[in-house]
Each structure stands twice: as C-alpha cells, then as structure tokens.
Amino acid sequence: MAGVLAWFWNERFWLPHNVTWADLKNTEEASFPQAEDLYLAFPLAFCIFMIRLVFERFIAKPCALGLKVQANGPQKAQPNAILEKVFTAITKHPDEKRLEGLSKQLDWDVRSIQRWFRQRRNQEKPSTLTKFCESMWRFTFYLYIFTYGVRFLKKTPWLWNTRQCWNGYPYQPLMPDLHYYYIVELSFYWSLMFSQFTDIKRKAAKMANYCKCQKLSDLLFLMFAVVFIVSRLGIYPLWILNTMLFELYEALGNFPALWFFNMLLIVLQVLHCFWSYLIVKAAYKAISRGKAGKWNPLHVAKDDRSDVESSSDEDDSVPRSNNPHNSTTTNGTSGANGTNGYLTGSTCSEDH
C-alpha cells in the first residue's frame, strides 16, 4: 500500500521542479495544504448527508406543505400481471407491434394499453413534494457556499490579482477560511455519492414551478441563463483558463500535473458551451411559445424543463381502436373490480 501511495503522490508529477513534499511540511509559523486533508472529506460527507435528511424532513417538507405543494405522487396503474411482466422484463416503451399483440391477448384497445404503460412509468417517478425538498436542500447549500465564498474574496482582495496570487507559489500558507471552503465543497459532492441513484436533478427555479408560480419560475430561469452564460462563457475562460494556461506556466514552468489539470479545465469549458446551447435553446422555446400569452412574455403551458411525460403526446400518436374494451371481459367476468388483471373503466380517464 505504501508503494502505491508513493507512486500516486510522485513529486515529479504533482509539483514544479525543485519542489518536494518536504518543502510543504507544516511549521510553527505557517501551515500548508497536505494530501491528508482530503481524507477529512469522507466523514464530513456522511455528516452532510445526515444533515440533508434532517433538513428535508423537518424544514423543507413543512415549507413545501405551507406553499401548497402536492404531496401525492403520480396516479398508480391498475395491477396487471401480464403487462407488469412486459414492463419489468422486456420493455417500458412497447412498440406498435407489441401493443397490437397485447391488445389481442387482453382484449383491450391499444390506447388503453398505452395509458397503462404511461401510468406505470410515471408511477416510478417521485412526487412533487420529494422534488421540492431536494431542490430546496441544494438551493440552501449553494446559497450558503456562494455567500461564504463572496465574503471570503471580499476579505482577501489580493486573490483577484492572479499574478500576485502566484507570487511565492507553492510556498503560500493555507488560510483557514480557504481550507474550510474547499473541504466543505468536496464533502458536499462526496455526499452526493450516497444519494446519486435516487436524487432528482433539479434547480432552484423548479421550486417556483412546483408551487405553481409560473412567472417567478420563468424569471428565475431567465436570471439563471444570464448568470450561467456570463460566468461560464465570459469570466471562466478569460480569467480562470487564461491564468492557468498562460500565467501559471510563466510563473512555474512545465510539469505534468499542470497539463493534466489544464486538460480537465478545457473539457469543462467544452461542456459549458454545450450546456449554454441547451439553456439558450430552452429559453428561446419558452419565449417563442409565450408570444401567444397576454400577460407573461415567458408563459408556457407546460414547463419544457420538466421530465413529466405528456399524456396527450402519446394519446395522439396512436389512433383509437374501433373496439375499445369495456367493463365486461371476454370470459363473462365483470371488470368493474379489475378481476383477471383487466383495467377498470376508470383507467380510461386522461392522466394529469
């Protein structure tokens, strides 16, 4: 294990020429960043995850209920063994040929089978209340860490001067506030490893949409789009990339870790361009559809940023059957109670 760690933390890869890890040992006069500091993120990540659970249950949930956010989830599909087997073992999106086969097997019309699959897919989606609580947690953390970072930069104006910042690097003492900022950020993203398979990716603007505040949702999304594009396509390449690609190279010379991190930063910039394109596309679509609105220039009937499936899209894609099923099954048993796995007549109503 010691050999692996020694290979991974090779000085010739991570540090500039004529610099060793021994040069960065803590002294009585100053402390420096240590590789061991990264280990602090693991227990803190678990603590942040537990704080999140408490926050969502005792703070976010009461706020959501106070704002009249719906607590119930999507409508559940009527139990059906045959369709459930197809859904879990074969496909969640049956094609036209399979729909016709199931229609003959169950004596249902195609449109009813489509509706069952749509309800079954939506059944696995979290409720609006769950989405709101997660969004509020992320909004609260990002607001806190952003405020802390701005306050820290205000106290240390020399950090805005990148050339002055590199003077004396890497022999710069570690400031406690900066150490705390990076460890908390790293711990937060490590904490997402505990919940990445259950999280619903949402932004703070979605909270307004969940509360049925369309105007506020559109305004927040517009503000987000402006801030994202200015910071990612303006400040990031002109300030961060410029100092990393050119100024830091002039100050420290060439070493492998510098180019490794620069490649990661360039990949991030490519992603920024792609994400900005998607944001502009969504904003343009919202503005274009909102031209018919009388009072809100960004009003849209359906939030294009939502992943909830539209019932009308699927219903219109397949024509109605000439022989829709009714509440009586072919073997003479009544379908009013959903016997033999048949859907009741109530499932024919449109989903919302």
Image (cartoon, rainbow, N blue to C red):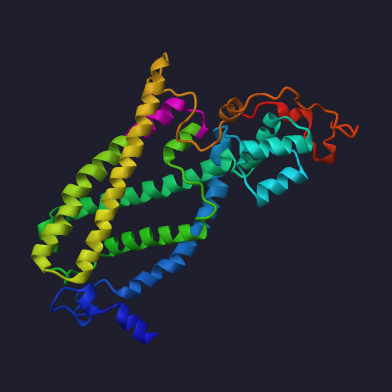
Q: Nearer the viewer, residue 322 or 283?
A: 322
Left or right of 152 in this view: 87: right
Type of secondary structure dominating the magenta stretch: helix
Residue at left offset 39%, top offset 72%: 39
Q: Which residues are magenta?
A: 210-224
Left or right of 15 in this view: 252: left
Residue at left offset 59%, top offset 30%: 314
Residue at left offset 36%, top offset 58%: 185
Magenta segment: does it hold 20? no
The mark total stands at 0
Q: Is residue 178 above or below residue 343?
A: below
Image coordinates of residue 144 in percent, x first then y, are: 37, 49
Q: Is residue 306 visible?
A: yes
Q: Is residue 157 visible?
A: no
Q: Is residue 210 above or below residue 90?
A: above
Q: Is residue 207 above or below residue 317?
A: below
> Hey, which quadrant is residue 66 in on the image?
top right
Image coordinates of residue 15 in percent, x first then y, are: 20, 74
Question: For the N terminus, which image quadrant?
Answer: bottom left
Image coordinates of residue 135 in percent, x first then y, are: 47, 44
Question: For the C terminus, which image quadrant?
Answer: top right
> Hey, which quadrant is residue 344 in on the image?
top right
Magenta segment: does it hold 219? yes
Which residue is outermost to the left? 250
Residue at left offset 38%, top offset 48%: 142
Q: Nearer the viewer, residue 40 or 85?
A: 85
Left or right of 337 in this view: 273: left
